[in-house]
Image: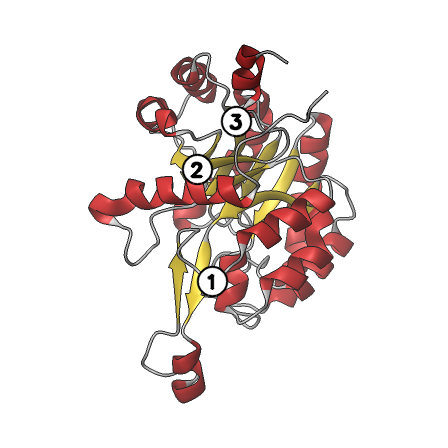
Amino acid sequence: MSGQQVGAAMGKHTGIRIGTLVGGGDAARVIPQIAPYGFESFNLTYWQTTGGADLAETAKRVKEAIGDRDIVISAVSVFGNPLTGHGDNADTLASWERLIDHAHLFGASIVSGFTGRLVGEPIDASMPKFAEVFGELARRAADRGVRLAFENCDMGGDWRSGDWNIAHNPTAWEMMFDSVPLDNIGLEWEPTHQMVSLIDPIPQLRKWVDRVFHVHGKDATIAWDVVREHGIHGPKPFVWHRTPGFGDTNWSDVITILRQSGYQGTIDIEGWHDPVYKDELEMTGQVHALNYLKRSRGGDFVPNPV
């Protein structure tokens, strides 16, 4: 292999890409500014509704913003409650449908978001509605070669009550996948939301990895001294969401488990949560996370001798 060929091969990684989340409405503006830092993928997100967005035009502008860079759109997402259709969530279900129908224009094959839930009700009560709504959405997605992935954030809810999402507990996952027994529904997983519940994310990932379609790059720091002295219901915070590289998770372990299972997706950094690397330090933290996650997957690709 010539020196030029070695240089071309260095840095080109097969398999897992490292990227970040970008608001769908801001993507065409933001991507050209941050792509030079080395992001390899982008997850485009909407909050509760895609609104009046022309998704075909958005996809065209995003592709123009990416240009000839080796970057993919990993997923398109809407985060709201598609089970109720109330208030600000009135358009969430229709937004899932739009994103499923337009995902191919972005080059994406994953649509993600919250499951929704019946507000104020236990998770069990939401299962029939979940099966009805996502059974239909999953079939619609399957016809278009799309997979659906559910974010594992509790959004302040628990088993007994909540406003947004049932997909934050492994018992709920079992119920969800039993109620909609289709291969194109799975998880948009990150360790953070499990750590907030004091669940060890590494054995959980090992058990559930075949259902993990998309990974968000977000971590957590648990203050075990606070837990031991004050518990989790006292006045002192006991856990903080962190940008990868600043939290407790060994991401080399995460990537090892993903690779051992044949995962070919992305890890997209979910920023804007870190209590330290925020405000003017937001992109400083994200680029640190980008480089940290690249090192965690082994650094630059180096070809074997021939």
Look at the numbered disc 1 and give the secondary structure of its residue.
loop
Identify which amino acid the numbered label 2 is placed on. Thr
Q: Which quarter shows the N terminus?
A: top right
The colour scheme applied to this rendered structure is: secondary structure
Tag 2: Cα neighbours inside 10 Å, few (<14), some, or many (≥20)?
many
| Residue type, numbered disc 3 | Gly
- At which x and y percent is residue 31? 36, 25
Q: Which is more N-terminal, label 2 or label 1?
A: 2
> On the image, numbered disc 1 is attached to which residue?
248
* Residue 125 placement (x, y as % from top left): 63, 65
Residue at 73%, 20% in the rendered image: 306
Q: Are marks 2 and 3 in contact (CB under 8 Å)?
A: no
The residue pinned by badge 2 equals 20
Q: In the rendered image, which residue does mark 3 sit on?
A: 11
Q: Earlier in the sequence, mark 1 or mark 3?
A: 3
- Picture layout, residue 70 above or below residue 208: above
Q: Tell which residue pokes out farthest to the left in this image.
A: 280
Alpha-carbon span between mark 1 and mark 2: 20 Å
Tell me the CA gap for discs 1 and 3: 27 Å
Which of disc 3 and disc 2 is earlier in sequence?
3
